[in-house]
Amino acid sequence: MENDKIRIQWFPGHMTKAKREMQDKMKMVDLVIELRDARIPNASKNPMIEELIQQKPRLIILSKKDKADAAITKAWIQTLSNASTMVLALDIITENITPKIVKAVQTLMQAKIERMIRRGMKPRAMRAMVVGVPNVGKSTFINKISKKKIAVTGDRPGVTKSLQWSKINKDLELLDTPGVLWPKFEDERVGILLAITGAIRDEILPLEEIAAWAMRYLLQHHAQALTKRYDIALCSDPYEMLNRIAQKRGYMRNHEIDEKRTIETFLRELRDDKLGPISWEVPDAV
Ligand SMILES: Nc1nc2c(ncn2[C@@H]2O[C@H](COP(=O)(O)OP(=O)(O)OP(=O)(O)O)[C@@H](O)[C@H]2O)c(=O)[nH]1
């Protein structure tokens, strides 16, 4: 059921429009900066991304690295890197990201720049566009790197929205508006992971299932974090674990466990990193 609801936001018309816009913009850029959430690098990926970028050089930014497990993020960087793809993990909010991006783009585009010089062309700034599914930090990234608030252009009929470029330095220009792509919503796991990390509004999903899924994963991968946060005995049943949290915290109503309060609190604490940095997906190689 939850996936029907996620799908509403991205009905085929939206997808076709997003795809067409991306293909148009693609003609004007030398490289693509693709943002994904470091906690869920697979679930926060657009299912058509490889086809959409048509072998252009790609810089993948694993955003929100402060919220992810550092060792697992390192493994993701290795897994996702290849000859035409560089991967950087960043905390976009606190890090000084601009020099890191400029350096990465230089490295990624070195062969192209040298080719231009060999052909007697004057080297010019490389043009990039930022793309990614909702909530991965695209606006935060663009605002920070271009050191200004992006103007929101009106969508009035008859007004052509011209593309604006931000000059980051002499070597790099960035499209001011990001390409918003759709997630792989037909996969139930993806919907759950987007919900756990706060990319989908709570009211569109059955919270009990999300909480149970999260609890099952934590029992398998981060049991210590659970014990540390809640100081309860562990058991393999995720629903019983939620009951134990409720009893420990006294979340009761009319002598019964207040399930709603328990689940909402548990999910909020997860999203607020109260259990520490957690990666919700691990690369196959690990
Ligand atoms: N902790 C942390 N939070 C981040 C980071 N990057 C972005 N955020 C937060 O993530 C949330 C989403 O960021 P946005 O920049 O709005 O994401 P977006 O991709 O533009 O989202 P849409 O407009 O939905 O497409 C905001 O609350 C940001 O403050 C990061 O590296 N670390």
Image (cartoon, rainbow, N blue to C red):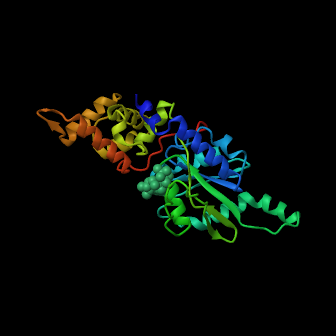
Relative to 124, say whether 273 is above or below.
Answer: above
**Residue at point 31% right, 42% down?**
266
Q: Residue furthest right?
A: 119
Answer whether residue 64 is visible to the viewer in this image.
Answer: no
The percent position of residue 233, horizontal first and vertical second, equals 29, 35
**Residue at point 74% right, 59% down?**
109
Is 91 in front, or is 182?
182
Which quarter of the image is occupied by the C terminus?
top right
The percent position of residue 268, horizontal first and vertical second, equals 32, 46
The percent position of residue 125, horizontal first and vertical second, equals 71, 66
Q: Residue furthest left?
A: 254
Relative to 248, say whether 130 is above or below.
Answer: below
| In the displayed structure image, the side of residue 76 where residue 4 appears, left or right | left
Which quarter of the image is occupied by the N terminus?
top left
Is 271 in front, or is 190?
190
**Residue at point 41% right, 31% down?**
2
| In the displayed structure image, the side of residue 212 where residue 106 appears, left or right | right
| Quarter of the figure with residue 253 | top left
Q: Residue furthest bottom?
A: 170
The percent position of residue 74, horizontal first and vertical second, equals 58, 49
| In the displayed structure image, the side of residue 24 where residue 278 appears, left or right | left
